[in-house]
Image: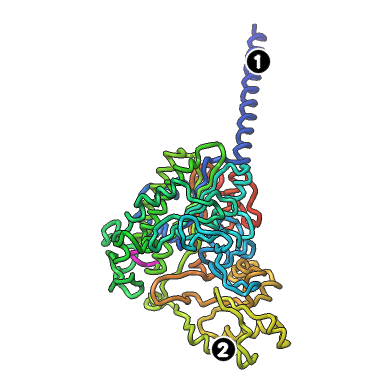
Amino acid sequence: MYQSRCFAVRFLLIGLFSVLTLSGQKKSKVEDESHLRVKPKLVVGIVVDQMRYDYLTRFYNQYGEGGFKRMITEGFNCKNNHFNYAPTSTGPGHASVYTGTTPATHGIIGNDWYDKENDESVYCAGDDSYASVGTLDDAGKMSPHRMTVTTVADELRLHTQMRGKTIAIALKDRGAVLPGGHTANAAYWFHGKDEGRWITSTFYMDKLPTWVSDFNASGAAQSYKKAWTTLKDINTYKESGPDNNNYEGLFKGETTPAFPHSTTELLDKNKDFDAIKVIPYGNSLTTDFALEALEKEGLGTDDDTDFLAISYSSTDYVGHNFGVNSKEVQDTYMRLDADLERLLTTLDKKVGVGEYTVFLSADHAAGEVPAYLKDMKIPAGYVDYAATKTKFSDFLKYKYGTEDIVKNFSNLQIFLDHKIIKNLDLNLKDVQEEIAQEYLGYDYIDRVYTGNQMWQNYYAAGIPQILQNGYNQKRSGDVLLVLKPGFITYGKTGSTHGSPQIYDTHAPLLFFGKGIKKGSTVARTEIPDIAPTISALLGISFPSGATGKPIGEVLQ
């Protein structure tokens, strides 16, 4: 009897152990598969033009619960995220976010640059081999052909045998064309002037889809031709400087830079649609159009992951005009927060809570207005180009007998005429160094590097590394100038960007949704890490030029 009971207990224990073992094996298999890849129905990439990281923290208490705050509290916040190259501008920024590499590799070295092979200035998205769609203007003659590698959206398209859709949207053409990559189903941008229409290029299609034409005819753009007033009582905007000050630019027809902004261009319903771009309503119009694309294109409704790339451009226009410490910038971000909440709420309904993945970053940050810094007794200033041109011309004529030795100056890079240098029996390396030494003597210059240094040396850290990551051997110049911190080549009002200084490189990076952990890190992350992180999450090939690495802490 006793032996029978012992046998029965042993049999039960063996059976229970077997069940637990099998269940553990099954769980491990499921875990292994989930670690292999995550398959959201939709990936949404958001780039906010000219967004500093501290806009998350400065305005945090003014934000609602469903926009930035939701992404921070329910998602992952990379607090020490940086651009690891210069120049920090819109074209290179969008290309770097989506290709997972830097201008040294993807080739977008500026918004515009001097093409030293063809002796002409080129635009990062311009392409005369294609025609406009949706307008008779040349504003649609665009393609991503100057970007020499694939984007994460391209790789997703390839992975799904082109079944997954990619739609890219921005007010700025480059903010849509570059993120969409080479295989996007569509990229749309806003053509203002006297039309106020969303347009595209024959690179993508021969005619606008019916839903886009219907949206253009709906009066949506006209509805935002109205006075810009503050979202909340301006007296509660304690996180920014005085409304009326000397550091801000004026809209045409205004006598002060203070709220409300109610110009003729803003109020006219039939023309001057570029006015919408330079106020926060441009971001609201972008959200409206993105939500229409989500619905009409059926994004996130089947088994193949789709990609929606959205760039918010109005933030950049506002920052350039009013500066990073303005009430206008604060109001713009508070309104953008409401637009983000509207976007996320719609994604919850249309795609499903937990069924989509979002990342949010910027194409560059921005610095304080130098005039403001100077008044605060902080070193800062402006470059006097007229005086510089005279001084440098005198140097060239004295040293080489001609100014023709320099072919172009753009993006703080000097392009030399190699043929003239050879004809004068000069050594290119020597000429680069002599010009670098000359510029190093100018008060506003912090440091100078030559193309030869970029070729011959490997820089592992600091500003030299940032410059090297932005240096493309086929496209970049012979001498690279770096301004002192706080110095800019810009007007006396408003903020700008482009430098390798930390105020231009520190930008937000938030991940949210399916496959994303909740948490944050102060470990350094870099812009080229975004595309590899999304690629690793999806289990797809990295973009063809990727040099960034997946951020492991982000992924579940």
Report how far apart the C-alphas of labels 2 and 1 lie in the structure.
96 Å
Residue 119 locus on image (x, y percent): 62, 75
**Residue pictured at 52% horizontal, 50% vertical:** 186
Q: Amino acid at mark 1?
A: Phe
Give the structural element (helix, strand or loop) at label 1: helix
Which residue matches tag 1? 11
Examine the rendered structure and indicate whether residue 308 appears above or below residue 189.
above
Quadrant position of residue 151 = bottom right
* Figure quadrant of the C terminus: top right
**Residue pictured at 55% horizontal, 73% vertical:** 411
Q: Is residue 503 left or right of residue 164?
A: left
Image: magenta residue range: 324-328
Examine the rendered structure and indicate whether residue 372 appears above or below residue 303.
below
The magenta stretch spans residue 326: yes
* Figure quadrant of the N terminus: top right
Quadrant position of residue 278 = bottom left
Crowd around label 1: few <14 · some 14–19 · many ≥20 (10 Å): few
* Residue 83 in view (yes/no): no
* Residue 302 in view (yes/no): yes
Q: Residue furthest top?
A: 1
The front one of 187 and 304 is 187
Q: Of helix, strand and loop, which mostly describes the magenta segment? A: loop
Residue 250 locus on image (x, y percent): 33, 72
If you read the primary sequence from the N terminus, does the residue marked by circle 2 or circle 1 appear first?
Answer: 1
Q: Amino acid at mark 2?
A: Ser
Residue 538 locus on image (x, y percent): 59, 44
Which residue matches tag 2? 393
The front one of 172 and 505 is 172
**Residue pictured at 41% horizontal, 43% vertical:** 346
